[in-house]
Image (spheres, rainbow, N blue to C red):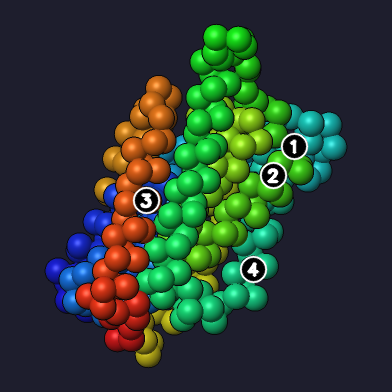
Amino acid sequence: MSWFESFILGLVQGLTEFLPVSSSAHLRLTAAFAGWHDPGAAFTAITQIGTETAVLIYFRADIARIVSAWFRSLGDRSVRGESDARMGWLVIVGSIPIGVLGIVLKDQIDTSFRDLRVIATTLVVMGVVLGVADRLAARDESGGRHRAARERKSLAELSTRDGLVYGMCQAMALIPGVSRSGATISGGLLMGYTREAAARYSFLLAVPAVLASGVFELKDAGGPGQAPLLATLFAAVIAFGVGYAVIAWFMSFISSRSFMPFVVYRIVLGVVLFVLIGAGSLDPDAGGGL
């Protein structure tokens, strides 16, 4: 992998990690369309450390409160009822599914899940799911001719059950094309949470899972079938800078806008992939191996 490739892939990671379009799919597709080798699952996981560092900084006040309250709750039962302490426990609960499935499905994540036909399918299917979830949220927010607007849930109402559902949605993002933010935000919207609440918990929930995955994959970086370590770390730095700017924009965007532009983009991209693969213009295993 050249430094130019590393820069472009880091840029793509930063631009797409927090949008509901799947950063892992876009890294895979960028390499395939550019005629480069697939950077590999380890590259994806390690560059995500960069974007999650951006989350740590952007939400530093929230995270500091949550971590502090969680540690205090370990020795003081009365603190466990506080919202920040509960959020700490719920982030842990929501992280369990992706931790377990990430270990169980590691071989598939590195191989069969990276097939472009799988990516095309998940782009379209999850695009439809996000569209339905967004439409239901919009109907609740605006009401209609024959119904009043319905108040949606905030993070203060997050339950253990909902945290586990969020976690299962996040685990689906082990398949490129699903999108971690897209799956968890869709799950949140379908459970009745506001757009901002769904996005905020999505970002907080990703921190332990992504950081743990990235650290775990460090042992494979630079090894057979993986991108060089220095190039990977350089991409992570680029992803951090770009990702921080994208978080700020996205949190502002969702406060007043629909997710439909992302829905259309996902479906169109998935259909284009199917057409190119069906026409023989694109090998579903394009760029496989280093």
**Residue marked by disc 2:** 163
Q: Earlier in the sequence, mark 4 or mark 1?
A: 4
Q: Which of 266 and 56 is in front in this view?
A: 266
x, y percentage for residue 197?
Answer: 56, 31
- Using the numbered discs, state the Cα–Cα distance from disc 2 to disc 4 in whole angstroms: 16 Å
**Residue marked by disc 4:** 101
Q: Residue 123 carries which label?
A: none
x, y percentage for residue 217?
Answer: 47, 74
In the image, what residue type sits under mark 3? Arg
Do the residues bearing badges 2 and 1 touch, measured as CB atoms within 8 Å?
yes
Q: How crowded is mark 3: few (under 14 residues within 10 Å), some or many (20 or more)?
A: many
In the image, what residue type sits under mark 4? Leu
Q: Of the residues tagged 3 and 4, which is closer to the observer?
A: 3
Q: Which mark is residue 266?
A: 3
- Using the numbered discs, state the Cα–Cα distance from disc 3 to disc 2 in whole angstroms: 26 Å
| Corner quadrant of residue 189 | top right
- Using the numbered discs, state the Cα–Cα distance from disc 3 to disc 4 in whole angstroms: 25 Å
- Using the numbered discs, state the Cα–Cα distance from disc 4 to disc 1 in whole angstroms: 22 Å
